[in-house]
Each structure stands twice: as structure tokens, then as C-alpha cells.
Image: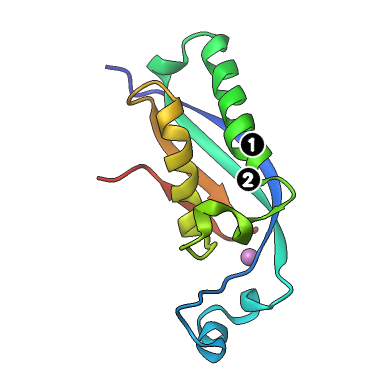
């Protein structure tokens, strides 16, 4: 059993605002601070997708991964407002939620069991990762 993994890096730029209708304006501000600014703000997101190497033998598997991530993630989110995406209709657009949304989008399109981990770099100092439900 191989324990080698391969990670590919992808990028998209998107706007978001941390806000939930479940809280009052004051409570939103207390929870999210400047990230609750009504005008929103943007990030240059970096997405790291790690697959088990057995699923990545040869470049064609990585080409397929690139194609899937480009079509399902980059084209969907690049230069968009994450708050307007249906995946966030009932979720705030935190890095924690984004990394899980990306996992849930990609997982069904990849060979069963091949997706190992998804990472999202949101800012210089904020990194989120998810490896599926335990
Ligand atoms: Ni932000």
C-alpha cells in the first residue's frame, strides 16, 4: 500500500462577506469584524488538492484532475461573489466552510477513495484543510 500523495495547486480570485442572517447586524459585526463590511472584500484563494498516488499514475490522471478542478471549482468561483453561490445559500463564506464545499464538489467526480485532502489558503496567514468526514 503506497503512502505517497500528489498535490496540485490551483488559484481563483473571489469576493465574499462574512455575514449570517441568523444574527443581528450588531452580532454579525461582533462575530466577523471588518470581514462583515457590507461592501465585501476579495481574496486570491489558493486551492491545494491532494490525491493518493495510486490514483495518479501517469500524467493522464493529473490531467484529468486538472480538468475536473478547473471546470468544477475554478470556473465556478473565479471572479465571483462567493456569497451568491448556491453552495453558500445557508452557509457563511468562511474558509472552514469553503474547504468543505470544495471537497464535497470534487469528491463525486474523482475515482472512489482517491481524494485525500483539500487545502485552501485564504490569506497570507490563514490556511484551512479538510480530509473528509471521519
Ligand atoms: Ni475574507
Other-residue count near label 2 (Cα within 10 Å), few / some / many at <14 / 14–19 / ≥20: some
Q: Which residue is mark 1?
A: 10
Which numbered disc, 1 or 2, marks the residue that appears first in the sequence?
A: 1
Of the 4 image quadrants, the one containing the N terminus is: top left
Residue at the bottom extreme of this rendering: 26
Ligand 1 is located in which of the four quadrants?
bottom right
Q: Nearer the viewer, residue 114 or 18?
A: 18
Q: Is residue 75 above or below residue 60?
A: below
**Residue drawn at x 51%, y 65% as measured from the top left:** 92
Q: How many marks?
A: 2
Q: Position of residue 61 (x, y in %)?
A: 52, 14
Q: Position of residue 25 (x, y in %)?
A: 57, 87
User: How far apart are the two marked residues, 1 and 2, measured between alpha carbons?
Assistant: 6 Å
| 53 sits left or right of 46 in the view | left
**Disc 2 on helix, strand or loop?**
strand
Q: Which residue is mark 2?
A: 46
User: Mark 1: is the Cβ under 8 angstroms from ligand 1?
Assistant: no
Of the 4 image quadrants, the one containing the C terminus is: top left
| 104 sits left or right of 36 in the view | left
| 46 sits left or right of 112 in the view | right
| 10 sits left or right of 116 in the view | right
Q: Tell me where residue 14 sits by quadrant.
A: bottom right
**Residue drawn at x 61%, y 35% as measured from the top left:** 9
Q: Position of residue 78 (x, y in %)?
A: 70, 45
Q: Is residue 61 above or below residue 108?
A: above
**Disc 1 on helix, strand or loop?**
strand
Is the image coloured rainbow, by chain, by secondary structure, or in one colour? rainbow
**Circles 1 and 2: CB atoms closer than 8 Å:** yes
Q: Is residue 110 above or below residue 56?
A: below
**Residue drawn at x 62%, y 30% as measured from the top left:** 71
**Residue drawn at x 34%, y 23% as measured from the top left:** 112
Other-residue count near label 1 (Cα within 10 Å), few / some / many at <14 / 14–19 / ≥20: some
Amino acid at each position: 500500500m503506497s503512502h505517497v500523495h500528489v498535490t496540485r495547486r490551483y488559484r481563483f480570485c473571489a469576493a465574499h462577506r462574512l455575514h449570517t442572517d441568523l444574527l443581528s447586524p450588531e452580532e454579525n459585526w461582533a462575530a466577523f469584524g471588518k470581514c462583515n463590511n457590507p461592501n465585501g472584500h476579495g481574496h486570491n484563494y489558493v486551492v491545494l488538492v491532494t490525491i493518493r498516488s495510486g490514483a495518479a499514475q501517469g500524467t493522464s490522471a493529473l490531467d484529468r484532475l486538472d480538468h475536473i478542478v478547473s471546470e468544477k471549482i475554478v470556473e465556478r468561483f473565479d471572479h465571483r461573489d462567493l456569497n451568491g453561490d448556491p453552495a453558500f445559500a445557508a452557509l457563511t463564506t468562511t474558509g472552514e466552510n469553503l474547504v468543505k464545499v470544495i471537497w464535497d464538489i470534487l469528491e463525486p467526480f474523482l475515482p472512489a477513495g482517491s481524494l485525500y485532502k483539500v487545502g485552501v489558503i485564504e490569506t497570507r496567514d490563514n490556511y484551512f484543510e479538510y480530509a473528509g468526514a471521519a
